[in-house]
Image (cartoon, coloured by chain):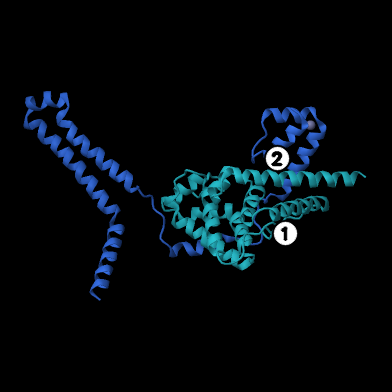
Chain colours: A cyan, B blue
């Protein structure tokens, strides 16, 4: 078999893995490790634990890959596995919590961009603090991962309308914070 | 569209392209254009970058895979039963077909023998595939059964 390219569609890679090409699974790991790692950090708040968590999640996804029916996208299916693993891991411990600085994100930004990002993080943290704890993960999946309401609903099991209204409020708060910032700069 | 309505739609927008009516308002209203752009760039900066950070899970996961059972394409039990049902129904239906009733008495055994052979092969192939693909499952059930018997005996 030809080696699979990094731009191949998830479904093609999955077909290859099911045909016995185990190495092809690495492409999926590379593609989604940030999301899974960060969910791990959010639930466990510890770097080593997050890596162990991610390893488990990917192995679980690999073993159960034949059960992926393609009713949702692979990324949503994987997110659901990671979310359930996170809930199970923290059943008696803490809840999901977005981190101030993202340990998965090691970009260097210009001071101005860094400021905007900090401002955004602060606004979203305020928004998260205002909701019941269990919904905080929805804001991260929406803002960090760019997931859509429906997919977040599939991954977490929360009603889409609830997710939508929480994201709506967070976005409005963020927009107001940015607007206030702008007026302050103009003065 | 009023600015108020535009901002409401903006906050309610999914992770998707804004609809045409919103794009039109942005073109005609510099204030909303600025607000939308500020929100978008903030969200973009916050969004995870495509490059991986300090940890790379690829080798760690790859190291584990040889020790777990490889995923295999499986046909669900429902599909198996469905296929079996179709096979059964067609075997019952075939002798009732008008073409069959016309041809069968004319050709006699010359016709009936090959037809029976084909049907027999189909049933054998179906049963064979079913058994082979469920060997794991059968042995699991057998082990569980033996376990239960041993438990009862003890
Ligand atoms: Zn406007």
| Residue A132 higher or lower than B68, as above or below | above
Report if the beta carbon of the residue with label 2 is closer than 8 angstroms to ligand 1. Answer: no
Question: Front-most of A172 and A34?
Answer: A172
Question: Element at badge 2?
Answer: helix
Chain holding disc 1: A
| Residue A17 higher or lower than B106, as above or below | below
Query: Which residue is identified by label 2?
Result: B11
Density class for disc 2 (Cα within 10 Å; few <14, some 14-19, many ≥20) is: many
Question: Front-most of A45 and B68?
Answer: A45
Question: Element at badge 1?
Answer: loop
> Is A7 on the left or on the right of B66, as rendered?
right
| Residue B104 higher or lower than A114, as above or below | above
Question: Front-most of B48 and A44?
Answer: A44
Residue drawn at (30%, 58%) of the image: B137
> Is A113 on the left or on the right of A12, as rendered?
right
Q: Say whether residue B79 is visible.
A: yes
Q: For residue B95, what is the image quadrant?
A: top left
Residue drawn at (44%, 63%) of the image: B66
Report if the beta carbon of the residue with label 1 is closer than 8 angstroms to ligand 1. Answer: no
> Is A108 on the left or on the right of A4, as rendered?
right
Residue drawn at (52%, 58%) of the image: A58
Residue drawn at (73%, 33%) of the image: B6
Query: Which residue is identified by label 1?
Result: A101
Q: Say whether residue A147 is visible.
A: no
Quarter of the N terminus of chain B within the rendering: top right
Quarter of the C terminus of chain B within the rendering: bottom left
Q: For residue B4, what is the image quadrant?
A: top right
Q: Point out the quarter of the image occupied by ligand 1.
A: top right
Q: Where is residue A146 in the image (x, y as percent from the top left)?
A: 64, 46
| Residue A177 higher or lower than A37, as above or below | above
Q: Where is residue A102 in the image (x, y as percent from the top left)?
A: 69, 58
Q: Position of residue B92 (x, y in %)?
A: 17, 35
């Amino acid at each position: 078999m030809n080696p699979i390219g990094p731009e191949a569609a998830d479904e093609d890679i999955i077909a290859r893995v099911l045909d016995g090409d185990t190495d092809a699974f690495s492409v999926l790991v590379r593609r989604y490790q940030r999301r899974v790692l960060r969910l791990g950090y959010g639930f466990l708040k510890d770097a080593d634990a997050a890596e162990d968590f991610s390893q488990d999640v990917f192995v679980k996804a690999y073993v159960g890959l034949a059960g992926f029916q393609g009713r949702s996208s692979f990324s949503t299916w994987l997110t659901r596995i990671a979310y359930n693993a996170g809930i199970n891991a923290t059943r008696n411990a803490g809840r999901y919590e977005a981190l101030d600085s993202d340990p998965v994100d090691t970009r260097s930004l210009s001071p101005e961009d860094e400021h905007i990002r900090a401002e955004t993080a602060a606004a979203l943290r305020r928004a998260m603090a205002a909701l019941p704890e269990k919904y905080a993960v929805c804001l991260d999946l929406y803002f960090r991962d760019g997931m859509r309401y429906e997919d977040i609903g599939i991954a977490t099991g929360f009603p889409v309308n609830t997710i939508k209204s929480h994201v709506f409020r967070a976005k409005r708060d963020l927009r107001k914070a940015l607007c206030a910032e702008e007026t302050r700069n103009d003065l | 569209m009023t600015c108020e309505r535009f901002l409401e739609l903006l906050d309610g927008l999914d992770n998707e392209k804004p609809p045409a009516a919103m794009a039109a308002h942005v073109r005609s209203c510099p204030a909303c254009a600025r607000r939308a752009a500020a929100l978008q760039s903030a969200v973009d900066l916050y969004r995870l970058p495509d490059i991986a950070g300090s940890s790379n899970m690829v080798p760690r996961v790859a190291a584990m895979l040889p020790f777990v059972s490889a995923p295999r394409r499986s046909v669900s039990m429902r599909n198996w039963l469905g296929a079996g049902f179709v096979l059964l129904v067609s075997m019952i239906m075939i002798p009732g077909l008008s073409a069959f009733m016309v041809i069968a008495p004319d050709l006699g055994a010359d016709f009936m023998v090959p037809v029976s052979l084909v049907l027999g092969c189909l049933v054998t192939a179906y049963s064979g595939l079913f058994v082979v693909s469920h060997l794991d499952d059968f042995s699991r059930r057998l082990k569980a059964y033996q376990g239960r018997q041993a438990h009862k005996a003890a």
